[in-house]
Image: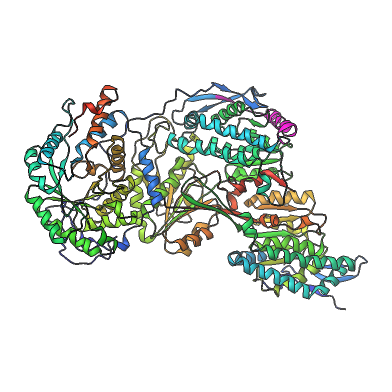
Amino acid sequence: MILKTYKLYIGGKFPRTESGRYDILKTSRGAAVANICRGSRKDFREAVVAARSAAEKWGAASAFLRGQILYRMAEMLQGRASQFVQELELQGFTLRAASRNTEASIDRLVYYAGWADKFQQMFSSVNPVSSSHFNFSMCEPTGVVAVLAPGEGGLLGLVSCLAPVIVGGNTCTLLASQSTPLTAITFAEVLHGSDLPAGVVNILTGRRDELLEPFSTHMDVNAIVYCGSDSKERQETRFNAAGNVKRTVCRHLRDWYSPDAQSPYMIADTQEIKTTWHPIDT
Amino acid sequence: MGKTRRKTGTTTPRKSRSPRPVRKLKFATDWTYSAAPESTDHVRLESRYGLFIDGKFSEPRSGRYFATISPSTEKKIADVADASTADVGRAVKAARRAFDGTWSKMKPSERGKYIFRIARIIQERAREFAVVESMDGGKPIRESRDVDIPLAAGHFFYYAGWADKLPYAFPCRDPKPVGVAGQIIPWNFPLLMAAWKIAPALATGNTVVLKPAETTPLTALKLAEVIQEADLPPGVVNIITGAGETGAALVNHPDVDKIAFTGSTEVGKIIQKAIAGSKKKFTLELGGKAANIVFEDAAIDQAVEGIVNGIFFNQGHVCCAGSRLFVQESVADDVVRRLKDRMETLIVGDPLDKNTDIGAINSKPQLEKIREYIQIGQDEGAEIYQSSCPLPAKGYWCRPTLFTKASQSHRIVQEEIFGPVLAVQTFRTVEEVIEKANNTPYGLSGGVWTDKGAKIFKITGKLRAGVVWANTFNMFDPSSPFGGYKESGVGREGGLHGLLPYVNLS
Amino acid sequence: MSSLQTLSMTATPSAGVPDLSRVPCVDAVGIEERCSRFQTRSIKKESKVAGLKHVLSMIDLTTLEGQDTPGKVRQLCYKAQHLHDALPRIPHVAAVCVYPTLVRVAHKELEGSGIKVASVATAFPSGQASKKVKITDTKFAVSEGADEVDMVISRGEFHRGEYTYVFDEIAEVKQACGAAHLKVILETGELSTLDNVRRASVLAMHAGADFIKTSTGKIEPAATLQVALVMLQAIRDFYYETGRMVGMKPAGGISRAKLALHYLVMLRETLGQQWMTPRWYRFGASRLANDVLMQIVKEQTGRYQSLDYFSKD
C-alpha cells in the first residue's frame, strides 16, 4: 500500500504546504497511515487571502443557494460514506463509532442546510421606533472566520463547527484536528465536488501549537471559533483576538451527538446584526 | 437645477451699471436671539458625592475625592469619590449578595416593576437631569432635554417590559442571568449610556456595578438617588466613581461575570486582553469613523441637515458620528456651499441656553486633541473652513469645522477625532464609495442619501457597519439595536438583541 | 448657466421653462425635523419684541371676503396705519390686500402712508378662468392703483404636467403687471407633495415672480412651516443660480405671534439678513396683527392682554 499524502485545501485547490514539512499519521499501534501536511503560517496567510476574496460573493449569495450547496455537501458525503468510515477507523475509531460519526455528519449538514433560509427570520426584527422611521435589524455574516476544529469528535466535530459558519455566509479557514486530519482533507474533496465556491472553506492540517498564534492574531480575520478545553490555549486565543477585536467563540462539547451540538444560535455566533433606518413620510 | 434650460429669449449677460453681485447669504443678522438660559433653580446638587454601594452613599476607603468641573465655565460643580480597588471589591460584593439573595430569585414581573419605576422617576425629574447633564458634560440643553433624558427613560421603560417575557426572546432556550455585570461608560452620553447598560442588565436578572466617566459622574449619581427612591433592593445597582484605575479594578475583579464597556477602541482592546484568561462575557461599544454618503439624486437640503446632525450633534462627541462625508462629485460644490451656509447658523455657546446648537467640548484634554487634529488636517493639505460664530471667553470651545479636499490617506480621514470636525471627500461611482467607506478598521455606523430605493438597499447592504441610516442620521431608539462591526465593538445594545449579552442560554 | 444669469434685481421674464427634473427632491421627514428645530428656538425678551415688530412691518393686512365693502376697506386701511396708537414706535404694516374692485378705495386711503396696496387677481382663489380673463383682471387691478398683484397658479394644469402653460401664464401676468410686483400663489394645500411645492416654486421664479406665496387662505391646509421651508430653500437656490432675490409670503392660518416668530426664525436661518425686511418677506394675515400687538404690550406691561383692548377692523 502506498503512503498517500493528504494535501491542504486552499482557494479551491489542493496545494502541498509551502513549508515542505510533513507529519506522518500513525495508527495507535504505530503503523504509518499517511503523510499529513504540516501547514505553516504562510499557508494560513494564503488561506485567509482566499477566504477574503470569496467573502463578498458568498455573503451575498441567496440563502436558498447556500442551503442547496450545504445539502449537496450532505449528498456528496453520503456518496463517499464508506471512505469516511474507513478513514475514521484508520484514525482510531471503531467501525461502529466511525459509521455513527459519518452518519451524524451527514445529518448535521442536512440540519444546517435547512436553516440557511430560516435563521435570518429567527434573529431579525422590525423595531417599533417612536419616530417616523422604518427600522429593522437583520443578520449579516461577520466575514472571514478562523476555526480551530475540535480535537475529538472526528468528522462530526469538524462539520458541527464548520457548517454554522458557512451557512451564515461567512468564509472560513479551518485547522483540522491533529487526530483526524485524513477525514478533514477527504471532506475537502467533498466540498470541492459540492458547488461550494472556491475559497469559502479552506482547510489546513498541522499543529495547533504552531498555528494558534497566526490564527488568532491575523488582522484580516473577523472571528475565531476555538474548539477545545485547554484553558491556556483559550486564553491565548481570546488575548490575541483583541488585536482587531475579533469575535471569539469558544466551544467545548464533550458529546457532539447531543442535541446541544447543533443549534441556530451557533449560526448567530458568527453573525453581525445590522440595523437600518429609513424615514416614513407622515 | 436648470442646467439644461432652453436657451431662448434674450440673454443680457450683464448690465454695465451693476457690478456682478456677490452671491452670499448673510447670517450675521440684526435680529438675534436673546440669551435664553434654562433655569437651574430646581436642581439639587450636593457639594460632595460618595460611592453608591449596597443602596447607600458611603465614603471611599481611599478617602480621596476629585472635582468634576463644568466644561463651559471651568468651575467646579462638586467633588466625587475616587473608588479604590477595595471600594470596587465592596461594590462587587454587594452586587453578588444582591444577585444571590434577592434579584435573581425575584419574580420577573416584580423585577420589571422596579425598572418601570426607575423610568417613571427619570421622566418626572427629566428637567433636573437635563440641566445637570448639560452642566457637567457641556452638551446643549436642547439635546439633553430632547434626546438624552427621554431616551434614557425610554430605555428603562423598554427593558422593564422584557423582564417577565425573556423566554419569548430566545425560542427553545431558558435564559438565565449572567451574574454580576461590571459596566464602564463614557462621557459623551452619561445618563443615556448608564441606561443602556443598567436597564437590560436588570431586566435579565443581573446585578450591576457601574462606573461613569470621571468627567461626567453627576447624572449617574443622581440616578443612584432615583434607584434609592425606586426602592431597589440594596446592591442591585452600585455606582462607583473614579478614573481608569477604578475601571481596571472592576474589569479585573474575579467575581464579575460580565463586562460591558463603551469607550475607545484602544481601551476596549485592553479590556478584551485583560479578561482573556477568565470566563467573563463582554460587550464592547468602541470607536467609529462613519461614512456619510451623499448621492447627486439625494434630497440635498435634507442631506445637508443630516450631515450637520451627523457630525455636530453633541459636539461630535459621538462614536457613530458621520465624520467622513462622501459627496458625489457632480454635486460636491453645491453640497459644500449649503453646508457652509448651514454651519453659519449654528450657535456655539452656553450649554444651558435653549438656543445653543453646539455646547462645550467635554474636557480640556479632549479640546487639545481636537485642536491637534485640526492642525494635522491643515498640515496634510486639506482645506479648512470654520464657521464664524463668536465663542465664549471661558470654557472649552470648538467651532464647527470642515475639511474639504481630504483624501483617504489623511489622518483626519482615518482616525477618530471625536469632535465637530468633518472631512469631506468626493467620489464618482457607487462601487468607489462603498470601497472607500469600508476602507477602515471601524464599522459602527454609516449613512446614505439618495432618492432611489434600490440604491439605498444596495449600499446599506454593503456598508460593513452595525447601524446604517438611510436618508437620516444619528437616530436612536430603545427598541433599535446598536453596535459595531470590526473594531467598533462586539455585541448589541438596545432592542431585542440587547438582551443577549446579559443572559446565558441553556 | 452663467450666460443666462439675469443680474438686475427686478424681475425680468425668464429665458425659458426650467428643467423641473433637475430640481432637488424633498424628504418630508427631514423637513419636519428641521421645522421642529425652528420651533424649539426660544425667543424671549428683547429679541421677542424686536421680532414681533419685524412681523408687524411684514404683514399684508388682508380682507378677501365676498361681503367686503368700501367701508370695511377704509377701516382696515386706517388700522394698517395706526395699529395701536397707545404704543409708541410701532411700525405700520407692509401692505393692505384686497380684491381688485376695492383697490381704488385702498389706494386713496393709503396715499402717502408708505403702505402698499396689494390686490389678488387672476380669478382668485380658484384660478379657474381663461388666461384672457386673468390678464384683464390683472390689468384692471394695476390700473386701479395696485402696487402688488397676488396671482394664483393654475394647479390643474400643474398637476397634469402642463408646466409650460403654467410658466407662460405667470410670465404673461407678470407682463400685465407692468411696474407692479407680482406675488405668485402656489396654493400649496392643493399641490399634494413637498416635491411639487419645490417644483412650482422654481417654475414661478423662473417665470418672473417677484414673490412666491404659499396660499390663498381659502384652502386647508394653508401656510405651514414645512411648505414655507421648501419655498425658502427654492428661493435660496434661485438666488445662488441667478443672483436675483425673490420674496416670500406665507399666508393663511398664521394668526398667532408665536407661530409668526417661528416663521421669522426660519427666515433668519435659511435666507439670512438680506431677506429680513418687508421688501422680501410678508405675512398674509388678517388676525395676526392684533395677537402680535397683544404680545408686545404684554412684554411691556408684564400682563396678559385681552382682545377687548385692540381694535378689530
Q: In terms of depth relative to the viewer, which is nearer, C301 or A169?
A: C301
Q: Residue at x 17, y 37 (%)?
A: C93
Image height check: is B109 above or below B289? Answer: above
Q: Main secondary structure of the magenta part?
A: helix
Q: Position of residue B499 (x, y in %)?
A: 64, 45
Residue B94 drawn in magenta: yes
Residue C239 visible in the current orientation? yes
Image height check: is B378 above or below A214? Answer: above
Residue A96 drawn in magenta: no
Q: Residue at x 32, y 45 (%)?
A: C225
Q: In terms of depth relative to the viewer, which is nearer, A171 or A7?
A: A171
Image height check: is C252 above or below B214? Answer: below
The stretch in magenta equals B79-104
Residue A219 visible in the current orientation? no
Q: Position of residue A208 (x, y in %)?
A: 77, 58
Q: In terms of depth relative to the viewer, which is nearer, B138 or C141?
A: C141
Residue C170 located left or right of residue B462: left
Q: Position of residue C200 (x, y in %)?
A: 27, 57
Location of the N terminus of chain B by quadrant is bottom left
Q: Position of residue B295 (x, y in %)?
A: 41, 59
